[in-house]
Amino acid sequence: MQMVCPIPTIHFKPVENRKKMGRGMYLCPCYYFPVRSGRAGRASFVVGVELKSGAVTPDHWTKRGTALIVSLD
């Protein structure tokens, strides 16, 4: 099992009225630091990113604690 793997660059497009999340989508948390609790006085959570869950259900990724990390330091 690979603990860290690269992901393509994600460009965010702000929208005023977001539609309901589609079926087969995983709401992946994005953290600034690998330590999810953050650092002294700084929260680590940034945003939830909707990703296609592929051939498995979104629960598959939730149970494995899958997340995006901005900085590996």
Image (tube, rainbow, N blue to C red):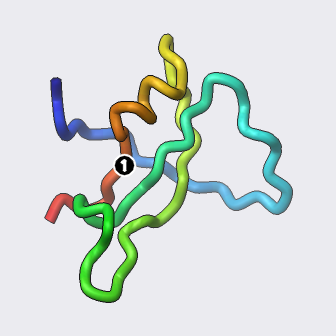
Splitting the image into 4 quarters, where does residue 63 fall? top left
At which x and y percent is residue 2?
Answer: 17, 29
User: Which residue position holds label 1?
Assistant: 68
Image quadrant holding the C terminus, namely: bottom left
Residue located 54% across and 48% down the image:
49
Q: Residue furthest front?
A: 63
Image coordinates for residue 36, horizontal then vertical, percent: 31, 62
Three-letter code for the amino acid on which mark 1 is drawn: Leu
> Which quadrant of the view contains residue 12?
bottom right
- Above or below for 48 versus 2: below
Foreground of the two, 7 or 63 = 63
SS of the residue under disc 1: strand
* Viewer-side residue, 45 vs 8: 45
Residue 17, percent from left and from top: 85, 56
Which residue is at the front of the view, 71 or 33?
33
Q: Residue at x 24, y 63 (%)?
A: 35
Q: Residues within 10 Å of mark 1 (few under 14, many from 20)?
A: many
Count of numbered circles on the image = 1
Rendered-image quadrant of the N terminus: top left
